[in-house]
Image: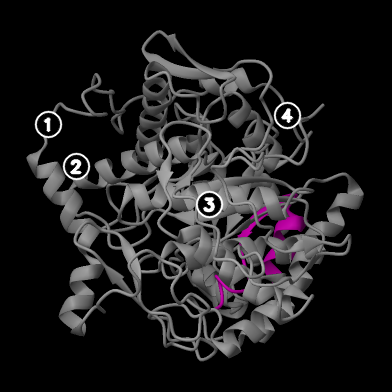
Amino acid sequence: MTRSAALPASGFGAFVARARAAGVLVVQPRMGMADPLRMREGLLATRGADAVTVGTITLDSYTRTGDLAAARRALAEGVGLNGYPIATHPADTTRAVLRGIADPRFPVQVRHGSAAPEHIVRALLAAGLDATEGGPVSYCLPYSRTPLREAVEDWRRSCELLAATRELGAAPHLETFGGCLMGQLCPPSLLIAVSVLEALFFRQHGLRDLSLSYAQQADPRQDEEALTVLGRLAAELLPDVDHHLVLYAYMGVFPRSPGGARLLLEDAARLAVRAGAARLIVKTTAEAHRIPTVEENVRALEAAAAAAAHEHARLARSGAPGPYGPGLQAVATGSDDTVRAGTGLVGTSPVGRTDGTGLVGTSPVGRTDGTGLVGTSPVGRTAGTDPVRTGLVGTGHGPQVVDTGIEAEARALIGAVLDLDADIGRALVRAFAAGYLDVPYCLHPDNAGRARSSLTPDGRLHWSNTGSMPLAGLADGGPRPPILGSAGLLSALSHVQRTYDARAAARPAAETFDGAAPVPIRTPAAPPRTTSMPRRELGLTTP
C-alpha cells in the first residue's frame, strides 16, 4: 500500500492506510445535496454509520460541466440540483458544512465527474479539502465531448494545484476513475491500464498520495484476477507513492429487487477483501429506481461493512493468509467479527508479490529514471520472448487466481502508451489518436471506436475486436463472437441485473453471507450511532 513500511502521517490516504493496517475495509457513499444543511446532515449520517467510513461530497452536473452561471440561477430560483455546487456556494458556506465533521477521523472526498476540473479543485482547496478523484481520460471520453488534449491540460493544472499544497504540509489525495470508464462491458485489461496510466500522470504532476480504482464487473473470478494485477502493477510502477486500491460497487444497470441489489453489494465487499482493496464505494438498493436517500446510503455502508467483516473472518477460519498478509488475524468481538493487525507486515505492499516466488510476472513495466517513467519495449514482454504468463496470478492471500491473460494485456497497453512519449499526457493523446487505447462503445470523437467487447454466459468479459490495440494473441481463447444488434447489447447490459434478481428470488429470505448468521439491518427509524467501535480503534491520524 505504501512506499515504505511506515504508514503515512496524515490525510485521506493516511486514514485509509490505518484502516487497512487494522484489517478493516473503508466504505464510502456517493452522496451530494445542493442544500448546505442537507449536505451536512448527509455527512453526519455517514460519519455515524456502524462502519469505518469516509465522507463524500458529490457535485452537481452544472458544476461538473463548468456552467457556473446555471448553478447560480438554480440556487437563486430554488431549482433542485443533483449535487453540491461547491464552486457556487461561498467557501465559508462549505467550511460551515464541514465544521465539526471533517477531521482526521473522518476525511471527506469531493467527487465530481468533470473533464476540466480546475475550478472545482480551486473551490475544494478554498474550503479546506484536499481529496478528490477523476482523470484526464476517464472523465473526458465517457462523460463529455471536451477534446482529450484540452482535458489533459486542465487536469495537469489541477494536479499541480493539488500538489502545491504539499508545501503547506497537506497530503492531497487523488483517485483515478480509470478503473470504471463506461461502467460496464469494458474488459478488465483496459480498465487496469487506464487506471495505472492516470496514476502515473498524477505522479508526474506532483501527487504522492493516490488510489487506483477498479469497478466490479460481472464475474467475481475475473474481477479478483483484475484487482490482483492492478495491485501488482501499482506496486511496480508507483514504488515512491503512497497508494491503495479502491473498488466501485457495480456501475452498470443495477438489480431492480432490493434483495438482488443487496447481494451485488455484498459480493462487491467480499471481492474487495479477497483482492486486497482498501476502500469500497457502495451502491444502494434504490440505484435502479432513483437517487437514494441518506438512510439508504447508511444501510448500504453498514451492509457492505458487515459483509466485509464476515469475509475477513471466513478467510481467517479457512487458514488462508489474511487479505493484507499473514500478520492479520480475525478476532471475534461480540456480535461483530473484526480483524486487527498482527505484527510484522502492517504497511507492506497490499497485493501480489514481486519477490521472485515464481507466481508473478517478472518483466518490468517501464522503468523509472528519476524524472518519471520512460517507455520501454512492450510492457510485460522481455525482448524475444512471449508475454509473461505463469498460469497463476498470486494474490498473497487465499487461493491463487488463474491467469487468463489480463496481466499480459494490461502490460501491453501500458507499455505501448509509455513508448509514445515521456510526457504521459502527450502519450495518452497520441495513444487514443493511434487507437492503442480504444474504449468499447464510447462515442467521444477522440476515441477510435473500433474496439468491441463480448460477454460470455457466465459473465466474463472478453474482446471481440481489439481494433488497433496491441493485444493480438495475448488473451486466452483469442477474440470472441461480438455482441450482435441492439437486442444483444441490451441483453448484455442487463446481464448483472437479471442474474442478481434471479439469485435473490431463489434465495431464502433469512439467508445472508453464505450461510452465516443474518446481519441485522438498521431501519430508517433506528437512532444513529454517533461513534462506531471500528473508528475508535483507528485512533487519530494526525498529531
Q: Which residue is label 2 attached to?
A: 259
Q: Residues within 10 Å of mark 4 (few under 14, many from 20)?
A: many
Q: Can residue 178 be seen by looking at this rendering?
A: no
Amino acid type, callout 2: Gly
Say left or right for 32 vs 510. Answer: right
Query: Which residue is nearer to you in this view: 479 or 174?
Result: 479
- Of the numbered discs 2 and 1, the one sitting upstream in the chain is 2
Extreme residue in the top direction: 334
Q: Which residue is label 1 attached to?
A: 509
- Of the numbered discs 2 and 3, the one sitting upstream in the chain is 3
- Whole-angstrom CA distance, mark 1 to mark 3, is 36 Å
Q: Can residue 99 be seen by looking at this rendering?
A: yes
The quadrant where residue 15 appears = top right
Magenta-drawn stretch contains 72: no
Say left or right for 192 vs 513. Answer: right
Locate residue 445, reporting x and y percent: 51, 91
Amino acid type, callout 3: Val
Q: Which mark is residue 229?
A: 3
Query: Which residue is nearer to you in this view: 162 or 400?
Result: 400
Please tell me whether residue 140 is drawn above or below residue 338 in the rendered image.
Answer: below
Secondary element under disc 4, as helix, strand or loop, is loop
Locate residue 1, reporting x and y percent: 66, 40
Amino acid type, callout 4: Thr
Q: Residues within 10 Å of mark 3 (few under 14, many from 20)?
A: many
Q: Which residue is label 4 attached to?
A: 541
Q: Which residues are magenta?
A: 119-140
Residues under numbered marks 3 and 4 in contact, where contact means CB atoms less than 8 Å apart:
no
Query: Which residue is nearer to you in this view: 436 or 485?
Result: 436
Please tell me whether residue 352 is drawn above or below residue 494 in the rendered image.
Answer: above
Residues under numbered marks 2 and 3 in contact, where contact means CB atoms less than 8 Å apart:
no
Locate residue 67, reporting x and y percent: 58, 79
Residues under numbered marks 1 and 3 in contact, where contact means CB atoms less than 8 Å apart:
no
